[in-house]
Amino acid sequence: MNRDDTTPTPAEERLVGALADREDQAVEAALRPKDLGEFIGQEKVREQLDLVLRAARARGATADHVLLSGAPGLGKTTLSMIIAAEMGAPIRITSGPAIQHAGDLASILSSLQEGEVLFLDEIHRMSRPAEEMLYMAMEDFRVDVIVGKGPGATAIPLELPPFTLVGATTRAGLLPPPLRDRFGFTAHMEFYAPHELERVVHRSASLLDVRIEPDGAAEIAGRSRGTPRIANRLLRRVRDYAQVKADGVITREIAAAALAVYEVDARGLDRLDRAVLEALLKLFGGGPVGLSTLAVAVGEERETVEEVAEPFLVREGLLARTPRGRVATPAAWAHLGLTPPHAPAAGNGQQDLFGA
């Protein structure tokens, strides 16, 4: 069945989803740090990037091409804007899915100014012909534009001004080696520690003019799944609750009560996450169980369970993927307050088919 473009996907509907919706994009524009000094977290990446940019400014040259990889919501777009600001250059923003033909890329590249930063989000989803054109553009600042068709087609070389490409990807393994090798600086964005997210929450609360106590910020940070975008989204929902149900000040109790309303538990699991765990534990005894069977039990599409719910459950050590199927860990039983079944009796470890 075809999905209408305006219909939100399961990942977009989730309060703890890492993909940005329109509200997130509007708020993030106001909350984005403007330079590396304001950027919270990613200490190694910031230190390395600072050296790259300072050296380029000292030489009076454009910065090396930069590849940023990592999960959604960790700050790749923000860093691209900071790179442009630090270099005093304009930024052009586009995405891999928007470039379906080499001509699309050629028109963008030919209109760049000298020193301009081109931010290419989801670069791994760019079409192959455009990708091959990008090789030459990154290395030689030149593209060949094909004019005409068939035997009479002619390649016209087009010189480009020096520019900096900032590529962002959530799946670095899908990038072909020739493209990865053309980036002068590659950085992997890590998930944030709770104390870093507390700083993010405090900074965002200050910009949004929200009164928040340290324990309230800690409560929100602990449920944010290591992702600043989720922390900011939870902060806005808790702010709404505090304004309607309390005196507008976010404390630990207010934050916990607000997030209980939105079904986000103390570990950051939401309704879908808990539904997957409960089905795995209560219906299948902790597994192993096949993905399709688990999806039917939850009432969701197979892709939704695999791509939306499972990554966080695996990262939290609550679920394991094995050759025989999905298996719950002892931590999953403990989190839901359930007692795991007894271990199988000594022997071959297989249940007798006829119960004998």
Image (tube, helix red, strand yellow):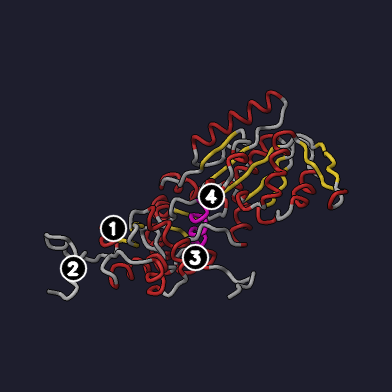
The answer to whether residue 277 shows anywhere in this view is yes
Amino acid found under the numbered disc labelled 2: Gln
Q: Position of residue 102 (x, y in %)?
A: 74, 50
Tell me if residue 176 is in the magenta stretch.
Answer: no
Amino acid found under the numbered disc labelled 3: Arg
Which residue is drawn at the image coordinates 53% and 49% (left, top)?
A: 171
CA–CA distance between discs 4 and 2? 41 Å
User: Which residue lies under the disc numbered 3?
Assistant: 14
User: Which residue lies under the disc numbered 4?
Assistant: 171
User: Quick one: label 4 or label 2, which is nearer the N terminus?
Assistant: 4
User: Quick one: label 1 or label 3, which is nearer the N terminus?
Assistant: 3
User: Which residue lies under the disc numbered 2?
Assistant: 351
How many residues crowd around disc 4 within 10 Å: few (fewer than 14), some, or many (20 or more)?
A: some
Q: Which residues are magenta?
A: 228-240
Mark 4 falls on what kind of element? loop
Amino acid found under the numbered disc labelled 1: Thr
CA–CA distance between discs 1 and 4? 26 Å
Judged by depth in the image, the label closer to the viewer, 2 or 3, is 2
Judged by depth in the image, the label closer to the viewer, 1 or 4, is 4
Amino acid found under the numbered disc labelled 4: Arg
Which residue is drawn at the image coordinates 57% and 51% (left, top)?
A: 207
Which residue is drawn at the image coordinates 66% and 35% (left, top)?
A: 86
User: Quick one: label 2 or label 1, which is nearer the N terminus?
Assistant: 1
Mark 2 falls on what kind of element? loop
Tell me which corner region of the image, top left, top right, bottom left or bottom right, holds residue 62: top right
As rendered, which of 105 and 59 lies closer to the eye? 105
Please give left or right for residue 87 compared with residue 316 in the image.
right
The answer to whether residue 205 shows anywhere in this view is no
User: Which residue lies under the disc numbered 1?
Assistant: 329
User: Quick one: label 3 or label 4, which is nearer the N terminus?
Assistant: 3
- Asked if 329 appears above or below 39 in the picture, the reply is below
Please give left or right for residue 75 compared with residue 281 in the image.
right
